[in-house]
Image (cartoon, rainbow, N blue to C red):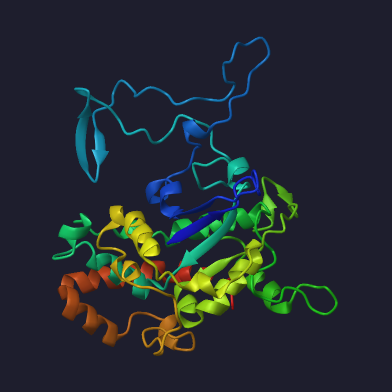
Amino acid sequence: MYFILYGLLTHYQGKRLFIKDITHYLVPPNGKPASIAPSLLTTKKGVGTEGSSVLTTAASPSSDATAVETNGSAKEVNGTATKPPYPYATAAEPGNPTVIPTEILKQFHFTFLIRHPRSSIPSYYRCTIPPLDEVTGFYDFMPSEAGYDEVRRVFDYLRSIGHIGPDMAGQANTNSNGDTNDAELERDHEHQPDKHNGTPNTATNGTTNPTPSNIEICVIDADDLLANPAGIISAYCQTTGLTYDASMLKWDTPTDHAHAKAAFEKWKGFHEDAIESCELKARTHKNKKHPPSSPSSTHSTTEAEMSEWKAKFGNEGARIIAESVERNLEDYLYLKGFALQG
């Protein structure tokens, strides 16, 4: 699960920064409460101080610390056992599920990239087992890294503070009278209160009706992009203020390929299909795994899927994949309800 941060310090010096990253890494693991990363704290000088900060800074490792843990293992730093840097000894922002201050989050134009867990989970699992694990360097499949829960919580937080929405990219948002469409009202009613914090999406720190930022909700589903790349990219350009050009869908020069290979060098084994491609064009076949109209797109894993996973990954692998798919399906379908339509 990914997001795109687009438009740092809107048009800073005539430029806009484009960042693609994984939401999972902005949110503390395993549902732990968030506190702001010390490196992102804003230094505020107090009265009579000489450069000291009135905000809490990161504390030194506690005296009872024993080890830094990485994937369940411990290690020493300079011969001294220490605790992991998280949790930070900093203040938390009410409702903010990330380690990034809200004032920084508000400087970006967010796009959320999603993919059906029936596609993403087996794909990731394949990268963590032989023979591909020797290429990727990933030897353990961690269900907690699926990221759907984290994406949904960040998404809902940005909605709750009015940074994105209520309008949705690529969709009609008002009727002829200028009122919100019934479909949008019905969807908002269905998804409130938020499942993670129990508060309505329109409430922020006890207040309601946050000032809108005029940034449309922008969620892009991988299947929609593959079914209609020109339409989705064109709609994306419209919501982000870019000028669409059909050449955006092609990268077929030596320079393009060299750039792609260099960019993905760190992630060998994960993006080979993309690296070896030269354009983004519509599928020539229907998506048989989970077409939008199919009940299997919203219901539990089918026998056919289990048989396919058992053949590829064995019984234990199929069980792990199926459990992870089921665990993330609800969050995916929730986000899918906001997906951009080209």
Locate the N terminus and report the quarter of the image it occupies.
bottom left
Residue at image point 47% right, 82% down: 227
Position above or below: 49 against 53:
above
User: 261 or 187: nearer the eye?
Assistant: 261
Q: Tell me the quarter of the picture where residue 86 sits.
A: top left
User: 80 or 15: nearer the eye?
Assistant: 15
**Residue located farthest toward the front when viewing the structure as drawn:** 254
Position above or below: 25 against 67:
below
Position above or below: 340 against 19:
below
Residue at image point 25% right, 81% down: 306
Residue at image point 28% right, 71% down: 122
**Residue 181 in picture, x, y percent from top left:** 74, 76
| Residue 118 visible within the image | yes
Q: Is residue 341 rendered to the left or right of residue 125? A: right
Give the total of numbered labels. 0
**Residue 105 in picture, x, y percent from top left:** 58, 46
Q: Tell me the quarter of the picture where residue 156 sits.
A: bottom right
Q: Is residue 110 rendered to the left or right of residue 83? A: right
